[in-house]
């Protein structure tokens, strides 16, 4: 029998990354007594730790993913207020940088593709400025003279996810929310067709059970390790590996002021002489090794655009695991058991989608009507069952 405790919460959030913390903070603000349970000894050590923090719905717009674009635009629009509110609530700077983005083309083929990309954005009502290489270099002088074409996307900014984690945790604690690290959730507890809480793993067998009326799964790529849920009630999430480098310019800031996106990859400035260079996309399960080939490809592609990159110091190399659902879009909102909610599977967009995810989840947790734009992201597209069928 699991050991019982006296802890009882309105909401238990499984996962202490950007998504889990954002949902928990908003839930606590609404008066729901909330606890975040993070498996690692520190918060935000999963995909959040590796993430570069691009807030780039326009740069990443894809005509085949209009619903995801709408979600991303809504979330990006909320970011300035979101980070200001987080900073006010907890007193920590979330590291939001109004930097804009350049999408660049290195050669003629890439330039033609970029013109098609611009036309596609125009059909979606997204205006971007077309820059010849010379004008792009005037704006970002570190760009290579061989650069052919660029699109200036002035409203695609960036945030430092590691700072945002610290700021969200401070905001949540200041509002009375609880955070437990080193608290791996082994299973979701259920009674018939409703959840009753979660049980933590412990070395010696069944661990502590934490009672909660509602459980939010925000466990990123580790979602699939969560026990206690019938298969029919599960959102399938797989890890998608991304190798990423953190670089520092010993000469200080100024090499690059905007986010730079190329095919493939990106360089994100932190505004203080540090840069994040990413990222590979690999289907390797839970492998987080950094390979010579991965690092070489990142540096090779980036150095063709920014030759000055060779002078930077490598401060960190890391591989993170993006959480991917079968359609690579997130599962947001109520699940197939009463009291079960999903904020999972954000794939490449977890940092961008944190504010809108929190809003959708708080609607779901409080029984308010979910925003219309969340309908395509219902977890039911994977579970396809009623609560009764799942519990049977
Ligand atoms: N958000 C960028 C990436 O996942 O690589």
Image (cartoon, grey):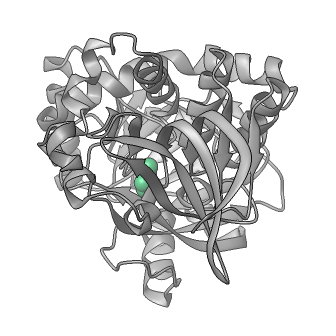
In the figure, 251 relative to 172: above or below?
A: below
Where is the N terminus found, in terms of image quarters? bottom right
Image point (60%, 65%), residue name: 2
Residue most extreme to the right: 91
In the figure, 93 relative to 234: above or below?
A: above
Relative to residue 370, is residue 252 drawn left or right? right
Image point (25%, 13%), residue name: 372
Choose between 134 and 115: the one closer to the eye: 115
Choose between 136 and 83: the one closer to the eye: 83
Q: Position of residue 152 (x, y in %)?
A: 41, 29
Choose between 112 and 67: the one closer to the eye: 67
Image point (18%, 19%), residue name: 124
Query: In this rendering, does residue 20 appear at all?
Result: yes
Q: Position of residue 386 (x, y in %)?
A: 15, 37
In the figure, 75 relative to 11: above or below?
A: above
Relative to residue 205, is residue 88 drawn left or right? right
Q: Position of residue 69 (x, y in %)?
A: 28, 28
Query: In this rendering, does residue 155 appear at all?
Result: no
Q: Position of residue 100 (x, y in %)?
A: 53, 29
Q: How many marks?
A: 0
Image point (49%, 21%), residue name: 362
Residue most extreme to the front: 1
Relative to residue 290, is residue 128 drawn left or right? left
């Amino acid at each position: 029998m699991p050991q019982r405790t006296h802890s009882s919460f309105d909401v238990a959030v499984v996962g202490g990354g950007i998504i889990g913390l954002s949902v928990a903070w908003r839930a606590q603000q609404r008066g729901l007594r909330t606890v975040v349970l993070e498996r690692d000894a520190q918060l935000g050590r999963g995909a959040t730790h590796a993430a570069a923090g691009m807030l780039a719905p326009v740069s990443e717009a894809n005509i085949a993913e209009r619903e995801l674009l709408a979600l991303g635009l809504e979330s990006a629009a909320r970011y300035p207020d979101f980070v200001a509110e987080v900073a006010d609530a907890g007193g920590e700077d979330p590291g939001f940088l109004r930097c804009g983005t350049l999408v660049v083309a290195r050669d003629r083929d890439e330039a033609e593709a970029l013109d098609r990309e611009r036309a596609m954005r125009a059909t979606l009502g997204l205006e971007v400025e077309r820059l010849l290489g010379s004008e792009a270099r005037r704006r970002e002088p570190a760009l290579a003279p061989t650069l052919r074409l660029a699109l200036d996307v002035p409203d695609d900014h960036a945030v430092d996810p590691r700072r945002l984690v610290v700021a969200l945790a401070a905001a949540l604690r200041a509002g009375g929310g609880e955070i437990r690290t080193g608290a791996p959730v082994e299973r979701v507890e259920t009674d018939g067709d409703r959840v009753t809480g979660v049980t933590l793993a412990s070395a010696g067998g069944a661990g502590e059970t934490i009672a909660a009326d509602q459980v939010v799964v925000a466990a990123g790529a580790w979602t699939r390790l969560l026990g206690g849920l019938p298969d029919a009630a599960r959102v399938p999430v797989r890890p998608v590996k991304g190798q990423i480098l953190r670089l520092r310019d010993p000469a200080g800031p100024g090499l690059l002021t905007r986010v730079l996106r190329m095919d493939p990859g990106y360089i994100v400035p932190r505004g203080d002489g540090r840069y994040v260079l990413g990222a590979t996309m690999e289907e390797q399960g839970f492998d987080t090794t950094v390979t010579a080939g991965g690092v070489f490809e990142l540096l090779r592609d980036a150095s063709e655009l920014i030759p000055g990159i060779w002078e930077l110091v490598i401060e960190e190399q890391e591989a993170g695991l993006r959480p991917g659902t079968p359609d690579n879009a997130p599962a947001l909102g109520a699940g197939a058991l009463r009291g079960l909610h999903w904020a999972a599977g954000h794939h490449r967009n977890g940092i961008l989608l944190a504010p809108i995810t929190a809003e959708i989840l708080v609607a779901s947790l409080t029984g308010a009507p979910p925003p219309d734009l969340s309908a395509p992201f219902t977890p039911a597209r994977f579970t396809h069952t009623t609560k009764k069928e799942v519990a049977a």
